[in-house]
Image (tube, rainbow, N blue to C red):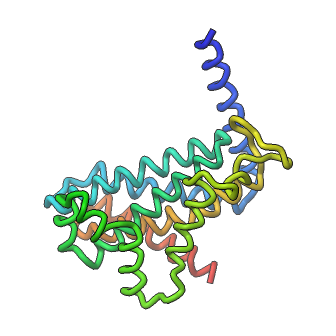
Amino acid sequence: MASAESAENLKHEETLRAESLAIIDKSATLKEHFRVVHDAMNIIYGLTHDHPHRSDDELTLQMLGIRLFNASAASIKLALSGYYQIAFAQLRDIVETYFLLDYFRTNKDKIAVWKVAGKRDLKEKFAPYVIRDALDKRDGFKEKMRGELYGRLSAYASHATNHGFILTTKENMGQPGPFVTEKLLTAWLEEMIKLLGHGALVYAGHFEDVAPNLETVKKEYFDMMKAWLAELS
């Protein structure tokens, strides 16, 4: 009996996935967003899977690339299947990972330190708020927007709060299990493109000596993101 119920649940999720993809397909903007997400995952995968690491630090970065890729894939699967709250929770994981990668971009000597850090050092030197504060100080940002973003994803998705009810509600009714709404799907994809799009840029920036085919993919992604960001400004 349980096996039959599981099969029905999987079938239902695939139906919702088709509905979600249809919503994306009918909107030129959402289609473009989804394409950028695909390209971001493609560059992360290429630099993680196809690039032979040349140092232990580079291997550490690639292990973080795996986390970035897997969190992105999980978020996509969950969002398209109608599990919005958990899909947004994966976005916080993407943010936390790419903030750390951004910190390592200008603190390369800390990569090896982080890799062997114990519980105390991870908390005192590499906790998410420590990394965010270091990045804000580096960039001269006083508005603490990184912290606001992280806090918003925590409050609405990762932590059990009343704010998160909006991500499990359809037409003013709480929904156990998956469901599709264009509003929440659009909100997720808009956040996904911003966070993963930038995260892939940060990750790719760590790899300067790569094979010609990967260099081409990397350049194409950088050029595409530069043009996209220019359109937003």
The single residue placed furthest to the top in the displayed view is: 1
Instruction: For residue 47, say whether it is visible.
Output: yes
Q: Which residue is painted at 47% across and 73% down in the image?
A: 223
Q: Residue 230 at x, y = what percent?
A: 58, 81
Count of numbered badges drawn on the protein? 0
Quarter of the image with the N terminus is top right
Q: Is residue 222 depicted above or below 27 in this figure?
A: below
Q: Residue furthest right?
A: 171
229 left or right of 15? left
Q: For residue 62, which quarter of the picture?
A: bottom left
Residue 145, placed above or below residue 215: below
- The image quarter containing residue 110 is bottom left
Residue drawn at x 77%, y 51% as measured from the top left: 182
Please say if 10 is above or below 22. above
The residue drawn where x is 69% and y is 28% is 12
Is 33 situated left or right of 27 in this image?
left
Task: Look at 22% across and 73% down and name the residue there.
Answer: 108
* Rendered view: 161 above or below 201: above
Residue 167: image x %, image y %?
A: 70, 51
Residue 219 appears in view: no
Q: Position of residue 36 (x, y in %)?
A: 55, 60
Between 96 and 31, the residue placed more toward the observer is 96
Give left or right: position of 193 versus 29: left
Point out residue 141 in the picture as x, y percentages from the top left corner: 47, 88
Report the front residue among 52 and 211.
Answer: 52
Q: Quadrant of the C terminus?
A: bottom right
> In the drawing, does residue 78 fall left or right of residue 209?
right
